[in-house]
Image: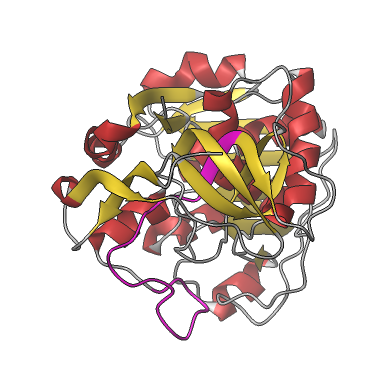
Amino acid sequence: MPTHTMRAVRLHEHGGPEVLQYEEVPVPVPGPGEVLVRVQAAGVNPPDWYLRGGLTTVPGEQEPSVRLPVIPGTDVSGVVEAVAADVDGLRVDDEVFGLLRFPGFRGSAYAEYVAAPATDLARKPAGVDHVHAAGAPMAGLTAWQFLIEVGHDHPSPFQAARHRPTALDAGTTVLINGAAGGVGHFALQLAKWKGAHVIAVASGAHETFLRELGADRFIDYTKSRPEHLVDEVDLVLDTVGGPGSRRFLRTLKRGGSHFPVLPGEFDEEETAKAGVTVSSAQVRSNGAQLAELGRLLDAGTVRVGIDSTFPLADARAAHERAARGHIRGKIVLTVA
């Protein structure tokens, strides 16, 4: 068992990367349904810097899910140190990875130990190291729940209708905007796994990376606007999303679908006239889906691109890297 204290990164105030403090805190005690994980690596995700910047309520929550001081982080890979009495299926020394307590800001993954709901975890693929496993949960599950299976019946905070993925096969053409990022590079590989023809949109520096992952066509958005080059697409997954996402409607065929990961502003009359569906979803923790993704990772069908790694003590530098943008794959914190 661990000692009573550990090292962790905490926020005592909101602000820039400089507010991330590396300090000594108590080791958490797992409650019912939880296990204590000795963290080997923690993924860095947009919600981490949203929390750092001052966001304390995720879409769909009525009340803030955190109070300061707080340990950020949701993506973890590590080793089970202790197991609550009511947990079946996991044992001490099992290697696991997971997306913890999302949606919400209570993951507390930037630490040497974390108490994790057993249902949020899956066994880490034997052929994948902890760094790559820690890069998979949030981005991989986002791509999975948008493209393959939602996996839950929780209402979306973004729309009244339940999100429904488009069936993907050899007759399907998918355009992925922001294809080199965390969600994008997973989505590309999952679409290829299903046999789809994939058009990847990113800056030119990422072309080789994306073609190695299986992109059939590459568009450098710094040189050309994809909506001027592409039409008759079955599905657009826009990992950038936001107000500019509606420009991709013109790339779709009638009956096509547009999935913005960050919902934008769309005119219902415009989408109805185009005969297309616009739909979004909110990723949720799901150990069972992560186990399915883990099998693809273990087989080499899907791989995790690593942009950079930083020691846990250098979380500030990791967030500074994220702020510079143009991330290729995932940023990961390593825990000694």
Q: Which residue of the protein is positioned furthest toward the bottom in this rendering?
A: 62
Give how far across and how far down residue 155 sits, in percent: 68, 78
Q: Pick whichever, 300 or 207, lies toward us.
A: 300
Give how far across and how far down residue 40 sits, in percent: 51, 30
Please determine whether, in this image, residue 254 is positioned above or below residue 167. below
Q: Pick whichever, 149 or 172, lies toward us.
A: 149
- Location of residue 158 by image quarter: bottom right
Give how far across and how far down residue 247 sits, in percent: 46, 56
- Location of residue 13 by image quarter: bottom left
Please determine whether, in this image, residue 326 is positioned above or below residue 257. above
Residue 230 in view, yes or no:
no
Give the residue drawn at x 55%, y 65%: 103
Q: Pick whichever, 233 or 239, lies toward us.
A: 239
- Name the quarter where the N terminus is drawn: top right
Q: Is residue 75 magenta?
A: yes
Q: As drawn, is 195 to the left or to the right of 249?
A: right
Give how far across and how far down residue 136 sits, in percent: 59, 36
Q: As drawn, is 305 to the left or to the right of 95?
A: left
Please determine whether, in this image, residue 195 is positioned above or below residue 5. above
Q: Does the magenta stretch include residue 224?
A: no
Q: Is the magenta stretch mostly helix, strand or loop?
A: loop
Q: Give the range drawn in magenta.
A: 57-78
- Name the quarter where the C terminus is drawn: top left
